[in-house]
Image: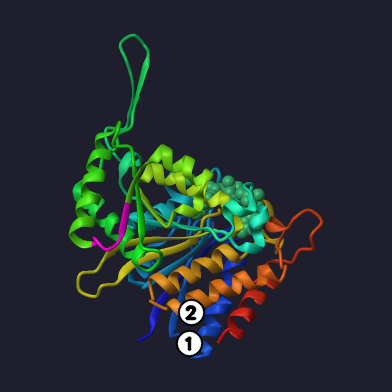
Amino acid sequence: MSKKLFLLPGDGIGPEIMAEVKAIIDWMNSAGLAKFETDEGLVGGAAYDAHQVSISEGDMEKAMAADAILFGAVGGPKWDKVPYEHRPEAGLLRLRKDLDLFANLRPAICYPALADASSLKREVVEGLDILIVRELTGGTYFGTPKEIVTLENGDKRAVDTQVYTTPEIERIARVAFELAKTRRNHVFSSEKHNVMRSGVLWKEVVTRVHAEEYADVQLTHILADNCAMQLVRNPKQFDVIVTDNLFGDILSDAAAMLTGSLGMLPSASLGAEDAKTGSRKALYEPVHGSAPDITGKGVANPIAMIGSLAMALRYSFGMIEEANKLEAAIAKVLADGLRTGDIAAKGEATVGTKDMGAAVLKAFQASF
Ligand code: NAI
Ligand code: MG
């Protein structure tokens, strides 16, 4: 059966890096490795320039009907004066909300060829492979009350509220345990139950889900501040880290930077499982933004976008072997010394987006 892939390149460098992913998808189809039915839409600045909205209703419908969405990047100074509700970022927020993408997967993998690009010592980061599972639709960023009020004496008082319910914690915990089973079978659950009531509930629910459904997976509870320290001190001890929206935002950025450049980092956002089909809504995108400073120059690193396709193969289509081979192809071109500007050491020769994409595709083809 063919699978529906909906491509939303966006604006900025989005279309440039998506072109390299399209070439890989086209080759997989023509080589008979997959039957992807692809369609393409406009989002962010690209949608605004065409329709004065951040995503059209027609493209929202296609996104809802797709088996997976590949998203490039959006945003930039060109759209700074656009009305708030039509700003490029609004398109991405609408997708996340309407598809109920509650599980954000942020891998931090250190390729041996780039271990010297890390700010930490090679022996601390070489071979590092962490997956952070961040709850994305609850917690402090969405809890109410959320307000700034002026007090009688003229002082102001600001409130954000951390809220989590049992079902919200259960579903993110299950995602983390399921993923751990496909990796090194170890989940670290991170909260601050020592000072937060939501942390007490988080720990209690994760402990119960573990005992009832995943007793064969190793579970370690770790306070979020200690987790941050351990990420920098001894990151290789981690496999899967599951945490809330706020701590996950910070811990995933810290973990990501252990590995070098923004241009290398893919991500996935997963929705709830459909009870009938077992499939889930999913959006895959690089962690980086639209990089207006290098847009149109043909120098953007396409690896984060290609890595996002590898995640889609693994998590939406069960194509584990193909996903592994695509990631191995990335590792191979890096080992061969190919570098875009963002990952090149001083004085090292660089290649552009197209050459990097073509080299990864060639290495991928050679692995079949
Ligand atoms: P950015 O990630 O776009 O760029 C930060 C720096 O990293 C820039 O110097 C850029 O050239 C470089 N960079 C990023 N991706 C690269 C790649 N693939 N290859 C080589 N170099 C790369 O973040 P910035 O500058 O803070 O934001 C620019 C715009 O992107 C803003 O409008 C922001 O709102 C938006 N943005 C969008 C995101 C998304 O679409 N999910 C995420 C983050 C920011
Ligand atoms: Mg962040």
Res. 347 visible in picture: yes
Relative to the observer, which residue lies in front, 74 or 219? 219
Is residue 350 shown left or right of residue 103? right
Q: x, y (%) of residue 112?
A: 62, 63
User: First in sequence: mark 2 or mark 1?
Assistant: 1
Q: Callout 2, which amino acid?
A: Glu
Q: Residue furthest top?
A: 153
Quickly name the residue at label 2: 322
Numbered marks: total: 2
Camera-side residue of 253 and 306: 253
Location of residue 207 with respect to 361 vertically, above or below: above
The percent coordinates of residue 124 (x first, y second) are: 58, 51
Closer-to-camera residue (83/334): 334
The C terminus sits in image quarter: bottom right
* Residue 322 pos. (x, y %): 48, 79
Quarter holding the N terminus is: bottom left
Camera sees residue 78: no
> Would you say the beta carbon of the disc 2 residue lies within 8 angstroms of ligand 1?
no
Q: In the figure, residue 94 lies in which quadrant?
A: bottom left
Q: Amino acid at mark 1?
A: Leu
Which mark identifies residue 33?
1
- Residue range highlighted in magenta: 214-219
In this view of the protein, which residue sits in the foreground, 266 or 238?
A: 238
Residue 257, placed above or below residue 147: below
The stretch drawn in magenta includes residue 53: no
Badges 2 and 1: C-beta atoms under 8 Å apart? yes
Callout 2: SS: helix
Is 130 left, or right, of 77 in this rendering? left
Residue for point 31% across, 64% down? 178
